[in-house]
Image (tube, rainbow, N blue to C red):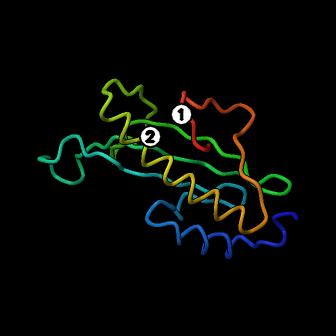
Amino acid sequence: MTLNAHPKSKLMKNFALLGPYLREDQCRNDHFFFDCLAICINVKLSAEKRQFWGWWVELKPKEGGFTYIYQLGLYSKNKGWQAEKIKTLEVQDKLETTLRTFHQRLNDMIVAMELTLEPAQDHSDHGIKLLA
């Protein structure tokens, strides 16, 4: 099965069912973008100045499914996402937990569409095992 059986509009509708992770304005015909602002690191600042620890995932179609890459890092409104090494174990655990949960739901959805989900060839897993 190829992605031709799944038009972009249908994929967007399905991906939106995963929750608040899909960023429609950052998706293109050959690219889907998801992210999670998991931990606010400066809640006392005004909303436009806050920074968040989180992750983002990019999906690209391939024959019969998708490849993915993900990054962990810091998000701010004026700089966007910046890949950062997470130094605090508690923050790392929270990010890994939310990423694994999202990834499992995404994988289940893609498999239900009779498609595959696998890491991109040049993707580094950052030591995080996503699926058993």
Left or right of residue 91, residue 100 in this image: right
Which residue is at 36% across, 42% downward?
94
Figure quadrant of residue 26: bottom right
Tell me residue 55's x, y (percent): 45, 43
Which residue is at 66% across, 45% downward?
68
Which residue is at 59% across, 32% downward?
125
Counting residues from the N terminus, which is met first, the one under dot 2 or under dot 1?
2
Q: Residues within 10 Å of mark 2 (few under 14, many from 20)?
A: some
* Local secondary structure at mark 2: helix
Q: Residues within 10 Å of mark 1 (few under 14, many from 20)?
A: few
Tag shown at residue 96 = 2
* Local secondary structure at mark 1: loop
Q: Which residue is mark 1?
A: 128
Name the one closer to the observer, 4 or 108: 108
Q: Relative to 111, say whether 72 is above or below.
A: above
Figure quadrant of residue 76: top left
Tell me how far mark 2 sits from mark 1, CA to CA: 7 Å
Where, quadrant-wise, is the C terminus in this rendering?
top right
Tell me residue 87's x, y (percent): 34, 23
Q: Relative to 25, say whether 97 is above or below.
A: above
Tell me residue 80's x, y (percent): 41, 44
Name the one closer to the observer, 112 or 85: 112
Where, quadrant-wise, is the N terminus in this rendering?
bottom right
Tell me residue 62's x, y (percent): 81, 52
Which residue is at 57% across, 42% downward?
130
Query: Mark 1: which amino acid?
Result: Ile
Left or right of residue 30, residue 100 in this image: left
Left or right of residue 56, residue 109 in this image: right
- Circles 2, 1 touching at the beta carbon (< 8 Å): yes
Q: Relative to 24, say whether 31 is above or below.
A: above
Query: Mark 2: which amino acid?
Result: Glu
